[in-house]
Image: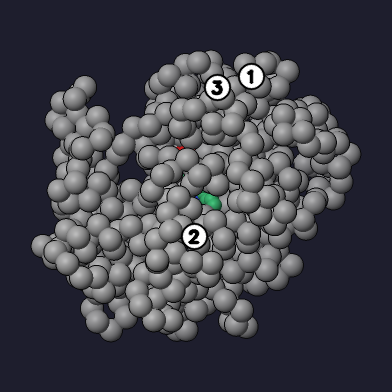
Amino acid sequence: MKFRKQSHIDGPQEHDEILFSTPFDYLFPDLARSPECLLPEGEQTVSALKELGKLMADPGDAGAPNEQLDSSVPAAYTYLGQFIDHDITARTDRNGPVSTIGEAETIEPVDPDVIVRDLRNGRRAVLDLDSVFGDGPGLAGTHLPSTTQSSDLYDEELTLRMFDDGRGRVDLPRHDRKAIIADMRNDENVLVSQLHTAFLKLYNETYARQTGTQRERHIRARQLTRWAYQSVVANDYLTKVCDNGVALDTLANGPRFLGPSTGRTANFMPLEFSVAAFRFGHSMIRPFYELNSKSDKVDLLALLGTSGNAENFDADGQLTKARIVDWRRFVGRGSKVQHARKVDTKIARGLFTLPGDAGGDPVLAHLAQRNLLRGFSLSIPTGQAVADAFGISPLGASELKKGETREIATLLSDSGFDQRTPLWYYVLREAAIQQGGEVLGEVGSRVVCETIVGLLKQDPNSYLANAHDPAINDRGVDVAPGRGGRINDLADLLRFAAIGF
Ligand code: HEM
C-alpha cells in the first residue's frame, strides 16, 4: 500500500507514509556557527562519541526488575513522548544526503547553512496530529505545496480505519502486517503502535457523538481530538517530564527564545530539540514490559520493528491478543503500573541492537551511538553553549563526572567532553544530577518547553487560541457531553478511547 502524492516540484510520487516538508533551523543559530560552541572536529571526537555511546548501554539483567532504575512517571508517558515526536519532527532520524553516520563513514560536522537549506522536516511543526489524520479526506492540498492522498486512512463514514474485533483486540489497519497510517514510525514498536490505535479510537468515538453532515462531524471531531491531545501535552505531559517551574513559566508567559518576541517570525522546528533534547525519552524506555494482565515480561527487542516480527501477529495479519496493551498497567497510580526508567545516561537493552533500518550497520543499530553521532554531524551546539545562551550556569566538569562510572569519567576527561559536552548527553546527565532522574533539568526543560509551548502558541488553531469555544475549559477539553467526555490527562484520554479500560 502506498500513499500517492502530486508534488508541484517533483511530479507524482509514492511513499509508505504521508509526508510534508517544512523547515528546520537552530534555536541558537550563532552557536551552530561558532567552532568553540561545537565539539572539536576530527576522527578523535568520532571515536570518543562511539565509545561514550557504548558505555551508556546498560546490559541489565534479563527480565529482572530493578526499581532503582525506575522513575515515578508511568510508562505510558514514554510513548506519548515518542508519539509527540512523530507528530512534529521527522528526517533528522535517518541517513540521507545531508547526514550519514554509518560505521564506515567519515563523519564530519556539516555546515549549518547546508543543513538549514537541505534538511527538511517531514512533518508540520504543529501539534495537529498530521501523523494520524494526514490532511483529512477531501481537504488535501488547499494550503500545501503538494497534494497528499489520505483517503486511504478513512472509511466511507469518515471514521478512521482501524481493526477492532469487538472483544478488546484493537490494532492499526494493516495490509500484509504493514500498518496503513500517515506516519510509519508509529508502528515502530508495539507500544507506540497501540497508542496510535488509541488516537484512532479517540477520534472515532468523538466523531460518533457529533451531529451534522459527515464533513461537519469530521471537522469538529478532528478539532476536538487535536485540542484534547494538545491540552494533555501541555498540562499533563510537560509537567510530568519537565521541571515544573519551567513548564508553568513557559505556559504562562510564553517562550522567550522562539517565536515573534525573538524577531524571528518564520515557523521552524529547532534542531536542538529534534536531534538532542527531545531524544531524552530514549533513556525512559524499559528493557521489558508486561503488556496486559496475562503477559509475562516481554523483552523490548520482541516489541521493536512491529511488522517485521511474525511473533507479534495472528494469521489474520493483525496484532495477536498477547500484544494488546492494557493501558491500566501504563498510567495511573495502581501497584501494577509500570514506570518509565529514570532520565539518565543509561540506555536499555534492546536499544543497542535495533532492528529496522540499521541494515546490519553496528552504529545504526546502536541508539546511543546514533544520537551522539547525529548530533555531531548536524552541528548541534554543546550543552554548555546552550546553557549559556539560556542564561543558565552550565554544569562544571566535576559535576558532570561525579557519580558516573570510572570509564565514563575518564572518557569525558580524555575527550574534553567534560568541557564541551554533546547536548543529548548533557541533558540526560543534567536530569540525573539536578532531578534524580525524575524529570528533565534546567537546559533540557527549557529546550523542550520552549519548543512545544512555542509551537502551540504560534498555532492559531490550537486550544490556547480558541479558549472561547465551549468545549474548552479550565479542567480540560470536552470531546463529548458528560463526565467521561472530559479529557484532562492521558488516563482520561485512554479511558475515553476505551482501550483496556
Ligand atoms: C522504543 C522506543 C524508541 C525507539 C526504538 C526509538 C528509536 C529512534 C531512532 C532509531 C531514531 C533515529 C536516530 C538517528 O538516526 O538519528 C530516533 C529518533 C528520534 N527519537 Fe526515538 N525512539 C524511541 C522512543 C523515543 C521517545 C520515547 C522519544 C521522546 C520522548 C523519542 C524521540 C526521538 C526524536 C525527537 C528523534 C528525532 C526525530 C526526527 O527529527 O527525525 N524517541 N528514535
Q: Whole-Å distance between the Cαs marked 2 and 1? A: 33 Å
Q: Is residue 297 left or right of residue 72?
A: left
Q: Position of residue 301 (x, y in %)?
A: 48, 59
- In this rendering, the label closer to the viewer, 3 or 1: 1
Query: Tag 1, which secondary structure?
Result: helix
Query: Tag 2, which secondary structure?
Result: helix
Q: Is residue 93 left or right of residue 318?
A: right
Q: Nearer the viewer, residue 203 or 381?
A: 203
- In this rendering, the label closer to the viewer, 2 or 1: 2
Q: Are marks 2 and 3 in contact (CB under 8 Å)?
A: no
The residue where tag 3 is placed is: 107
The residue where tag 2 is placed is: 231
Instruction: Give the residue at x 29% y 63%.
Output: 221
Circle 3: residue type: Ile
Query: Tag 3, which secondary structure?
Result: loop
Q: Position of residue 293 (x, y in %)?
A: 47, 84
Residue 191: quarter of image: bottom left
Instruction: Give the residue at x 24% y 29%.
Output: 145
The residue where tag 1 is placed is: 30
Circle 2: residue type: Ser
